[in-house]
Amino acid sequence: MPKGIYIPATQEAPLEHRDLTGLEDYQTAVGGYIEAVDLSEAGATVFVNEEGAAA
């Protein structure tokens, strides 16, 4: 089961460890449709709200 770190948009909110079992979990975390952003040098992928990916 993939695990993730939820990083909220506000600095006051704490980081959260989350289990991500399917598409619905990712969509709930980002608040809508997801967009994958690969961070190849870090060997990681960040999932963001697709509307905010280009911002």
Image (cartoon, rainbow, N blue to C red):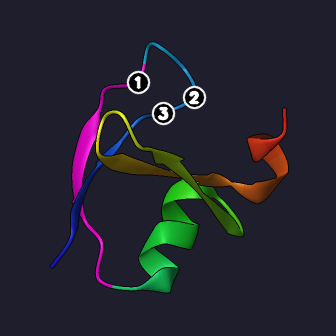
Give the Cα separation between the discs numbered 2 and 1. Answer: 8 Å
Residue at the spot of label 2: 9
* 12 is higher (above) or lower (below) than 33: above
User: Residue at the spot x=71%, y=69% of the render?
Assistant: 33
Magenta extent = 13-21
Discs 3/1, front? 3
Q: Considering depth in this image, is 50 or 36 the residue closer to the camera? A: 36
Give the Cα separation between the discs numbered 2 and 3. Answer: 4 Å
Residue at the spot of label 1: 13
Marks 2 and 3 close (CB-CB < 8 Å):
yes
Image quarter for residue 34?
bottom right
User: Residue at the spot x=47%, y=14% of the render?
Assistant: 11
Marks 3 and 1 close (CB-CB < 8 Å):
yes
Secondary structure of the residue carrying tag 3 is loop
| Amino acid under disc 2 | Ala
Label 2 packing within 10 angstroms: few (<14), some (14-19), many (20+): few
Residue at the spot of label 3: 8
Residue 29 is one of the magenta-drawn residues? no
Marks 2 and 1 close (CB-CB < 8 Å):
yes
